[in-house]
Amino acid sequence: MKNDNLIENTLRRINNVEDFSGVVHMEKDKDTLILTQAGYANRAEKIANNIDTRFGIASGCKLFTAVAICQLVESGMLSFETKITDCLDYDFPNFDSEVTVHHLLTHSAGIPDYFDEDIMDDFEELWIKQPMYLLKELKDFLPMFQNKNMAFKPGERFHYNNAGFILLGLIVEKRTGVGFTDYIEENIFRRCEMNESGYFSLDRLPENTALGYIEENGTWRTNTYSIPIKGGSDGGAYVSAPDMNKLWDGLFSYKLLGEPTTNMLLSSHIEVKPYVYYGYGIWINKKENDVFKYHVMGYDPGVSFHSAFYPESGIKLSIPSNKSKGPYKIMKMLEDELLSKG
């Protein structure tokens, strides 16, 4: 893909997409094709976003959890068919004993969720009765779902589930003896040289980290009381756009997993809808029988994020934002105007 005029015209339009606040980083073979930033990391202090600003990515980091589980499978600590009743000693009185690691990774376990996105519209509603500042560890989420009933039989269908990834994180902790976020930072971020990325507590954010902003009645407030105080295995890491593209490099150059296990992670394990599939912690879009893109996404109050790897061209694209919208439309625009033109 090389059309400087087309790229320049596209760049001029990006900042007009829903008053975009964030970063757009597109690259191929270490060559930067698009790199731009807009908006404020801190609106009160008028501190602008820059290329290396860290953004919350919400569920965009479920891929990190899946990679961690795959690393444990490679090391022989568990298998994809390991049952959760065999690797977790918490009490789940109403769970089906046949739920496996594979079911959790593919959102097909049928276990109850603490936030069902098909039922609840507003993530902030969760924190009316459950103070978000008390959710500092993965086990703190368990009372929100562990005693509820199954929604369907394991493997019956796809139903996006955050609680399943909480359990996967607890499995990582149980099998390694290491805190989940410490494990990810050491075994994924460090391997990929993602030096700007981490799981930061909202009350201890490092410099050059964007605050998330929620629009309300024509003004703005931060998302400080709208999301858990610290991210974990179902979402909430902070990454920069260039760091996320390093993650794609690490995954597809087998720095994180061997080739057979990488292929397992990237397999189309379950069909979500026509031409859209789910692997292990990753979305897969196809055109006819060919993969068009592997991608991850995340949405929280004050957070929106899209990132993708396009195998045909080798292009990596990451778009984090500290507002609740923007990246999806920008990604679609770039795909329509640039990637479709080769």
Image: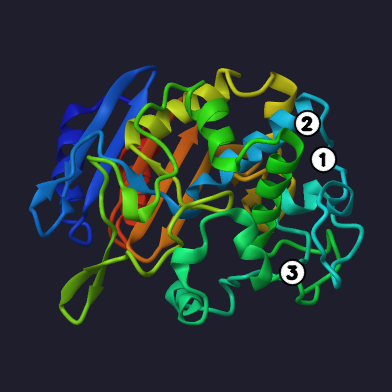
Residue 86 in the image: x percent, y percent? 89, 48
Secondary structure of the residue carrying numbered label 1: loop
Q: Where 249 falls versus 131 (above or below)?
A: above
Mark 2, Cα crowd under 10 Å, few <14 / some 14-19 / many 20+, is some
Judging depth in this view, the residue of 179 and 27 nearest the camera is 179
In the shown orientation, is residue 36 left or right of residue 320? Answer: left
Q: Amino acid at mark 1?
A: Phe
Q: Amino acid at mark 3?
A: Gln
Q: Residue furthest left?
A: 46
Q: Where 129 falls versus 162 (above or below)?
A: below
In the picture, the disc for residue 146 is 3
Residue positioned 78% across, 31% down in the render: 73
Secondary structure of the residue carrying numbered label 3: loop
Examine the rendering and report whether any part of residue 279 can be seen.
Answer: yes
Judging depth in this view, the residue of 200 and 110 nearest the camera is 200
Mark 3, Cα crowd under 10 Å, few <14 / some 14-19 / many 20+, is many
Give the residue number, with chain letter if any, for mark 1: 80
The reply to whether discs 2 and 1 touch (Cβ–Cβ < 8 Å) is: yes
Residue positioned 29% across, 57% down in the render: 326
| Distance from the alpha carbon under mark 2 to that under mark 1 | 7 Å
Of discs 3 and 1, which sits in the foreground?
3
Residue positioned 59% across, 75% down in the render: 118
In the shown orientation, is residue 283 left or right of residue 269? Answer: left
Give the residue number, with chain letter if any, for mark 2: 73
Earlier in the chain: of badge 2 and badge 3, it is 2
Quadrant into which the C terminus falls: top left
Q: Amino acid at mark 2?
A: Val
Quadrant into which the N terminus falls: top left
Judging depth in this view, the residue of 86 and 239 nearest the camera is 86
